[in-house]
Image (spheres, rainbow, N blue to C red):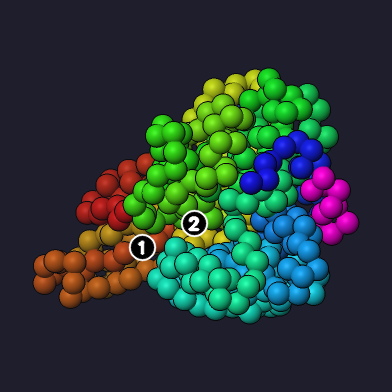
Amino acid sequence: MESVTLASIQAARERIAPALYVSPCQQSHSLSELAGLPLYLKLENLQRTGSFKERGALNKLLTLTEEERARGVVAASAGNHAQGVAFHASTLGVRAQIFMPLATPQVKVAATRAYGAEVVLHGASYDEACAEALKRCATEGGTFIHPFDDPAVIAGQGTIGLELLEQVPDLEAVVVQIGGGGLIGGVACALKETHPKLRVIGVETAQLPSMLRARVSGAPVTIGAAATIADGIAVRRAGDVTLPLVSRYVDEIVTVDDEEIASAILMLLEQEKTLAEGAGAAALAAVLQAKTNLRGLRTAVLVSGGNIDVTLLAKIIERGLVKDGRLLRVRVYLQDRPGALLSLTEILARERANIVETVHDRAYYGVSLGETAIDVTLEMRGAAHITALNHALHEAGFRFERIQ
């Protein structure tokens, strides 16, 4: 099998350069202060299809023979890989069939079709869609483009490493998310073969640490399915090609949970005005949560993709506001008489708590016949503001409780 080397990554860079955007990598001063180190963000979420995946897809497509191009390509993906293959195959005039699970969000299906691919919905999971894609390749002769376990795909992703070395002077550490290992395998190879002392840290979601398990076991192992907001790195089994690369070049693998990832998404949105999906923010989450000791090291973090479902984003923003004390919901019990609600709103106005929503109910919440209850959602200014409001309500004799 063809191996991944510095030379193959350099060749991939020359091959894909005319059609690929060199994403920016600039220092974030606000996040540097929070992390306690010079922190640079490599914004792969700004690629045409919203993620780094098109690097590997394009490199693989450009290595196909004319005969292989004529037969077309097949891929299985629920998101970013699908869009990368679809876009560049269409640009090159290559027929692409993308197999996606039946439960794939319609926005991703529509985007993949819009890029010019034929989408086939099949199976309840990525594994079932992939099995069907491989079956189609066997019967119709198309070339399967694996999302991570292919030397040409890995070499394409590794071009990010070459760009980082040019964009960040005196780079000392790089933090990269891990799904199947194609991204970190290529990036780490490019970095370590050029600067062996540079530290490379991998980040997996705590729900699916397949590469971490593989390193411990010495071989890929299949772990149980689990839900995570980092669906782009929700891979149950490390790659056969990627594991040796990770074992050789990656210094450490750490994990982050969904709450930590959600916090990093919100941080990127507020501090950097950039949008990241769950997988895209995982590397930053590890740095902000100090999962490994990088203090003082000039560090680059990959923001690997930005294709997030807007409904999920809305939930992340709301939960982040609650966590920061900027959104509060309280249930206040009132006497069921005229003027009771007015006395409550006067206190809220005096404490400068802005009412977002109210739900007034006499029949539920277990209130007595002479009482009513009202749920009030409020915009607040933080923990101290909430404490002051609690004190004011208590002093006025209101019975109330916070709703989590």
Residue 189 seen in the current view: yes
As shown in the figure, which amino acid type bears the numbered disc 1? Val
User: Residue 242 appears at what percent x and percent y?
Assistant: 57, 42
User: Residue 5 appears at what percent x and percent y?
Assistant: 72, 37
Q: Is residue 19 magenta?
A: yes
Few, some or many residues within 10 Å of mark 2 (<14, 14–19, 20+): some
Q: Quadrant of residue 177?
A: top right
* Mark linked to residue 376: 1
Horizontal relation, residue 230 to residue 167: left or right: left
Horizontal relation, residue 183 to residue 222: left or right: right
For image coordinates 65% across by 38% down, the residue present is: 301
As shown in the figure, which amino acid type bears the numbered disc 2? Asp
Q: CA distance from mark 1 to mark 2?
A: 34 Å
Residue 274 seen in the current view: no
Upstream in sequence: badge 1 or badge 2:
2
Query: Magenta segment, which residues?
Result: 11-20
Nearest to the observer: residue 172 or residue 14: 14
